[in-house]
Image (tube, rainbow, N blue to C red):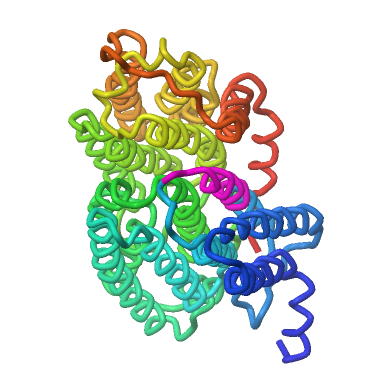
């Protein structure tokens, strides 16, 4: 590709260019606006994100590579970019009225969120090892800063420090795996790596070590066992809108880069986008991923039972959901990948909704303790009913979108053969376990008496509106899911 061709790539890079432009405008506006008016940068950030969304939806191009074969424009990347944009739009809307960000400048906050969005866009599209690393680091570094954004709170500082330490170690391990893979193949392009591995003799042990190291980096981003240690403390200490964002968007970005890497680089065929693919190497990769998935589900759900802080409980719940999603990667076929993508789309709404309820209760009643949710379901019925819907959706009960999402995952396992039946059973057992701690919140809100003298306070209409916009798709995707399922199915096309 020539320099001229590289400049022509900008034409297909419009959504990312809009995000970059919005970041610059937000930073400049924050410098101009007085401190008490810095929250107005939220409007700029929101408008820029909507603009990028429109540009993405209008982008109708055949799959192609951009910028010296480092970035791909394809339906697979577009699907995940839609998830990122929806998540960012809701987080900006939530952040606008949260009390946790009072006395902090908003311009820096929203610019960092948009920088994270840019990094996630690049993660979903990266087809080069160097670009994968750079985009992952862009997301990670902004995540570290946002996790510790409340610099006057010791809990937030602790969260950021732990996040940096765990992130630095896991990223270093991943980068070492990349260097080994480059040494084996002599290229950083994942498609070329695939061709070299098919055509040449390589050391199976060396390849296995490289892939395991790379899996460590991806595992950290999706918070799977044994790379989950950062998650509970970071989720508890970060501002709740950022906790909600970290539980959805960067996790989806981690799965996007994991799927693309495995589905392009480590297949035993000349056609990456095939109906059935098998990882190269001497290790039984499906069994390894199945073990990681099972351990992630069990650890997340069993430890969540013992949590009293609802943000920590949802953190361990998020770990468990990473285990559920990994079940789709275990079967190593198109149906499994479709189930993963559909689950991530539905998970976006139900998890953001649960965190928004936490924010509203924290803003209104000043608590994150589950025991102090007593009687809120009767005192504030609308909030209690909606929280119940989100808890049932996260459990996977009908008629919510969570039920359909888990149905697709279990169907992919069962259709893949009897060797995966045990993992489906493990998934069902963990869904039952998760119902215990999700139902505990419902019990506290509806089956426990409220403390005497509890004053019922009216929530902000803006938050109520955003909450309604989250609960509608959570329910709608439980009865009408065909359009999103078709979108996910049609997105299984890689460059």
For residue 478, above or below residue 217: above
Q: Where does the image place residue 459, in percent across and percent down from the top left?
A: 51, 28
Q: Per the image, is 166 magenta? A: no
Query: In percent of the image, x 70 and y 71: which residue is there?
Result: 17
Query: In percent of the image, x 45 and y 78: which residue is there?
Result: 200
Q: Is residue 104 left or right of residue 62?
A: left
Q: Main secondary structure of the magenta part?
A: helix
Q: Is residue 228 left or right of residue 28?
A: left
Q: Is residue 485 left or right of residue 117?
A: right
Quarter of the image that includes the C terminus: bottom right
Name which quarter of the figure residue 302 lies in: top left
- Which span of residues is magenta-colored? 84-99
Query: In percent of the image, x 71 and y 33: which residue is there?
Result: 483
The answer to whether residue 227 shows anywhere in this view is: no
Q: Where does the image place residue 485, in percent across and percent down from the top left?
A: 65, 35
Name which quarter of the figure residue 182 lies in: bottom left
Quarter of the image that includes the N terminus: bottom right
The answer to whether residue 373 shows anywhere in this view is: yes
């Amino acid at each position: 590709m020539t320099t001229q061709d590289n400049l022509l790539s900008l034409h297909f890079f419009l959504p990312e260019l809009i995000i970059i432009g919005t970041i610059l405008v937000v930073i400049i506006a924050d410098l101009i606006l007085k401190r008490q008016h810095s929250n107005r940068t939220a409007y700029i950030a929101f408008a820029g994100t909507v603009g990028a969304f429109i540009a993405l939806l209008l982008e109708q191009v055949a799959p192609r590579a951009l910028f010296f074969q480092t970035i791909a424009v394809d339906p697979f990347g577009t699907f995940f970019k839609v998830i990122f944009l929806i998540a960012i739009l809701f987080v900006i809307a939530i952040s606008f009225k949260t009390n946790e960000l009072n006395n902090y400048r908003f311009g820096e906050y929203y610019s960092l969120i948009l920088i994270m969005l840019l990094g996630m866009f690049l993660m979903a599209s990266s087809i080069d090892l160097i670009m994968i690393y750079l985009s992952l680091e862009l997301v990670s570094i902004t995540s570290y800063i946002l996790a510790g954004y409340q610099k006057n709170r010791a809990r937030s500082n602790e969260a950021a420090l732990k996040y940096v330490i765990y992130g630095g170690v896991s990223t270093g391990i991943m980068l070492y795996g990349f260097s080994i893979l480059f040494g084996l193949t002599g290229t950083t392009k994942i498609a070329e790596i695939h061709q070299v591995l098919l055509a040449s003799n390589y050391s199976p042990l060396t390849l296995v070590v490289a892939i395991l190291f790379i899996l460590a980096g991806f595992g950290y981003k999706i918070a799977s066992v044994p790379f989950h240690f950062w998650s509970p403390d970071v989720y508890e200490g970060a501002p709740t809108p950022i906790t909600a964002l970290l539980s959805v968007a960067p996790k989806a970005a981690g799965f996007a880069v994991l799927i693309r890497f495995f589905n392009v680089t480590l297949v035993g065929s000349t056609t990456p986008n095939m109906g059935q693919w098998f990882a190269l190497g001497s290790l039984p990769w499906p069994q390894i991923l199945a073990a990681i998935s099972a351990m992630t589900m069990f650890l997340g759900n069993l430890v969540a039972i013992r949590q009293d802080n609802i943000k920590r409980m949802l953190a361990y719940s998020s770990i468990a959901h990473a285990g559920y999603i990994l079940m789709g990667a275990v079967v190593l076929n198109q149906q499994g990948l479709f189930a993963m993508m559909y689950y991530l789309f539905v998970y976006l709404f139900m998890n953001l909704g649960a965190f928004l309820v936490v924010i509203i209760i924290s803003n209104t009643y000043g608590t994150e303790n589950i025991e102090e949710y007593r009687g809120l379901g009767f005192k504030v019925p609308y909030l209690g009913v909606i929280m119940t819907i989100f808890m049932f959706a996260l459990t996977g009960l009908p008629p919510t979108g969570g039920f359909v999402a888990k149905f697709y995952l279990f169907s992919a396992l069962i259709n893949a053969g009897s060797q995966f039946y045990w993992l489906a059973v493990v998934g069902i057992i963990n869904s039952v376990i998760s119902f215990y701690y999700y139902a505990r919140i419902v019990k506290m809100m509806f089956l426990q008496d409220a403390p005497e003298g509890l004053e019922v306070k009216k929530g902000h209409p803006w938050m109520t509106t955003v909450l309604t916009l989250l609960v509608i798709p959570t329910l709608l995707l439980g009865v009408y899911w065909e359009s999103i399922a078709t979108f996910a199915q049609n997105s299984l096309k890689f460059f």
